[in-house]
Amino acid sequence: MYHALADVPGLTVVPKVTDILGRVCVGIRVHFGRSGAWTGIFSRTTFQPLGINVQAVGPRYDREAMAVQSTIVNNLPKRP
């Protein structure tokens, strides 16, 4: 996912970004004009997605972040 996003015009590679757990990672960022930015956060070694950081700027400042727990599975569970 990281490599695909890194090639999209208008997205910016962020070589050093820290997630909410304090891990130093790489990121892919898109700016929403003057209203904020979205950053996808990825492992520096495996490029697995680790989380996101959303920063909104406007009448009120708002910032949200999420960490993703990665899991390796042999097969997908059946959907209900």
Image: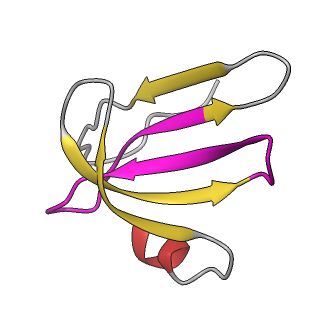
Q: Is residue 78 left or right of residue 45?
A: right
Quadrant where the image shows the C terminus = top right
Kindly indicate the quadrant of the structure image that contains residue 73.
top left
Pick the front one: 12 or 46: 12
Percent x, y of residue 28 = 48, 61
Q: Is residue 4 left or right of residue 51?
A: right
Pick the front one: 58 or 48: 58
Q: Residue at x 48, y 38 (%)?
A: 52
Percent x, y of residue 78 = 52, 34
On the question of residue 8 being in view, the answer is: yes
Q: Residue at x 24, y 50 (%)?
A: 25
Kindly indicate the quadrant of the structure image that contains residue 64.
top right
Percent x, y of residue 6 = 48, 76
Span shown in magenta: 32-54
Residue 71 belongs to magenta span: no
Q: Residue furthest right?
A: 59
Q: Is residue 57 left or right of residue 74?
A: right
Position of 30 relative to 65 (above/below) = below
Residue 33 belongs to magenta span: yes
- The number of callouts visible is 0
Position of 47 relative to 3 (above/below) = above
On the question of residue 1 being in view, the answer is: no
Q: Report the colour scheme.
A: secondary structure
Q: Residue at x 62, y 80 (%)?
A: 8
Percent x, y of residue 69 = 30, 30
Q: Residue at x 44, y 34 (%)?
A: 77
